[in-house]
Amino acid sequence: MDLTDNTLDTRDIRKHVEEEQDLINCMREDLSNCFDEELPEALRLECATQRENALYILKEKVRELVSDIISQAEDLHPWSQFVEEYEDEIEDFLHGALLIADDYFEDYTEQMARDVVWTGDANWNAWPLNCIDWSNAAEQLQQDYMDVTIDGHEFWVR
């Protein structure tokens, strides 16, 4: 998922959150395994050098897992916060509501107009179509949308 995309689908966001949470849970299980199985096994080694080497390797593995878990959780936070905050508020959240980036909304408005008012061979770069104030049209269309923010990025959604 990329917050710089022009559009996002709530189904994709939800799927991303679930997949990332599953990944974090797997890393937590690996971390637990380090303490439940690998640590006692390393401590049972009779040779001090082997025990020290095993404990050093285990320490590095634990350090890497903790770092990965923290990094994944930080990356996931804005997405999971968005799902938690808007899942019940956005009507079509589960079925796929489209989020439109604020800086793309004017282009989206023009494309939507083209899709709705297609006039066959109309030249959109000629009069009267090139006279449309797309900024004003976008502002009026936004009246039907809700403004949402994900990690400082503004989107519009119905």
Image (cartoon, helix red, strand yellow):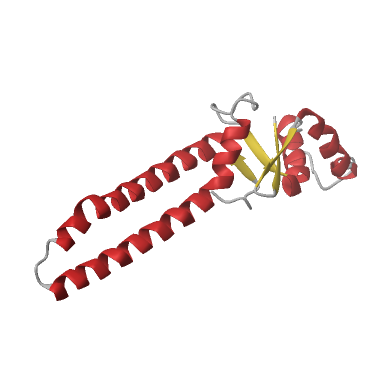
Q: How many marks?
A: 0
Residue 120 seen in this snapshot = no
- Quadrant location of residue 53? bottom left
Residue at left offset 63%, top offset 32%: 86
Q: Which of 143 and 59 lies nearest the eye of the viewer?
A: 59
Residue 40 seen in this snapshot = yes
- Quadrant location of residue 148? top right
Q: In the displayed structure, does residue 48 sit left or right of residue 153?
A: left
Q: Give how far across and how far down residue 33 sits, in percent.
A: 25, 50
Q: Which of 137 and 54 lies nearest the eye of the viewer?
A: 54
Q: In the displayed structure, does residue 85 sit left or right of residue 61?
A: right
Q: Give how far across and how far down residue 140 sits, in percent.
A: 85, 33
Q: In the displayed structure, does residue 53 sit left or right of residue 75?
A: left
Q: Give how far across and how far down residue 55 sits, in percent.
A: 24, 67
Residue at left offset 54%, top offset 26%: 95
- Quarter of the image for the C terminus: give it: top right
Residue at left offset 79%, top offset 34%: 142
Residue at left offset 73%, top offset 30%: 116
Q: Which of 112 and 38 lies nearest the eye of the viewer?
A: 38
Q: Give how far across and how far down residue 126 sits, in percent.
A: 85, 46
- Quadrant location of residue 123? top right
Direction left: furthest residue:
46
Rendered position, 115 above or below 62: above
Rendered position, 11 above or below 91: below
